Amino acid sequence: MSPTRHSGATQQPRSSATQLPREEPNVDAESPELQDIEDVENNLNGPSQNANDGDGDDSSESENRFMYSVDQIVAIFTEFYQFLARLHYDPANLKFPPPEGWPQLAPDHVGSWKEDLALDVIRHLPYFSWGSPATQLDYKSHLVDYSTCGPEFFAEPDWWEEYMDYNDSCNPRMCFIIAKGHESYGQQWVVDAEHGQIYVESLRCDRSGPYDLRVFLRGVMEKYRNLELISSPGRVTLDGSRVPERHGRVSEEEIMAEKAPFGETDVSVQFVRQVYRDYGWPNSFQREECQKYINDLMTRLEEAGLESWERDWKS
């Protein structure tokens, strides 16, 4: 479960899928069949409190040390994960801890793997169980589920800390990977629990950030709504941020006539957008029906000797 790099050549994505938006987008307040989003918003909008409240330190430096409290960080991720569960992630795989946090992540199980604040966040986060086929969050990137990590995982140091050279802008022991990339340009997300920020590492390439955690995740939500990020279970996430919307429909005949691998041309990216919208994206997405159509089409492409939408290596 610790971050690993996987070999294998791959094409560079069109652009980093996780650029920070210029403006904070609006967030859909509806969350059917999941935890009440109003409760989440209340946690998000409440005053940020120091993780060390109660120790008698009333200085302004102490009061403002952390950008978000543990509860606020958990609420920010809850909002984001519930959004994903209304789209391409299976809501049945979204799981929440009891109020005291995941018992398997209690202090006596995780030891001193990270600083107490980071461990407290990890202990109280919701997580997605691994589905079959696996679902990517970003380009060649999967969410991490710490609730499945045993004591042997936390007994070993997080070796990724030695690669977190952020010019002293954060403490690596306050940081943890929430989305693990693989292969070249795989997008790896690193949360800085102390400052309420997130970094994005493009493996074997570059790093961007830090970004404000809530603004960043809401920006990713907007990219999903607009189908600038396009994910399908068992497939590599497509970055359509540079693909303009096309007026008029794309036919299957056009797709079958394409010579380039599916997903690497503007026409194929626009076709996926069209299919997703036909199946109700984003407000009433018929995930299983859409996935079946996509997989059937990819089978036909392969039978015709064409390259289909790249498969996720975990599927």
Image (tube, helix red, strand yellow):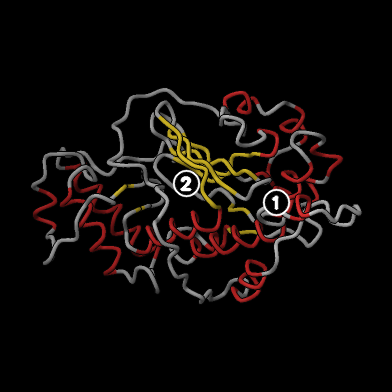
Q: As displayed, is residue 54 above or below residue 298?
A: below
Crowding around mark 2 (Cα neighbors within 10 Å: few <14, some 14 to 19, many 20+) is many
Q: As displayed, is residue 242 above or below residue 89?
A: above
Q: Residue at x 75, y 59 (%)?
A: 49
Q: Residue at x 15, y 61 (%)?
A: 246
Residue 134: x percent and y percent? 47, 46
Task: Measure the alpha-carbon separation of dots 2 and 1.
Answer: 34 Å
The part of the image, by quadrant, that contains residue 260 is: top left
Identify the disc placed on residue 66: 1
**Which mark is first along the chain, 1 or 2?**
1
Where disc 1 sits, the SS reads: loop
Identify residue for label 2: 134
Q: As displayed, is residue 73 above or below residue 307?
A: below
Identify residue type, mark 1.
Phe
Q: Residue at x 62, y 50 (%)?
A: 196
Residue 81: x percent and y percent? 55, 59
Residue 146: x percent and y percent? 66, 44
Identify residue type, mark 2.
Ala
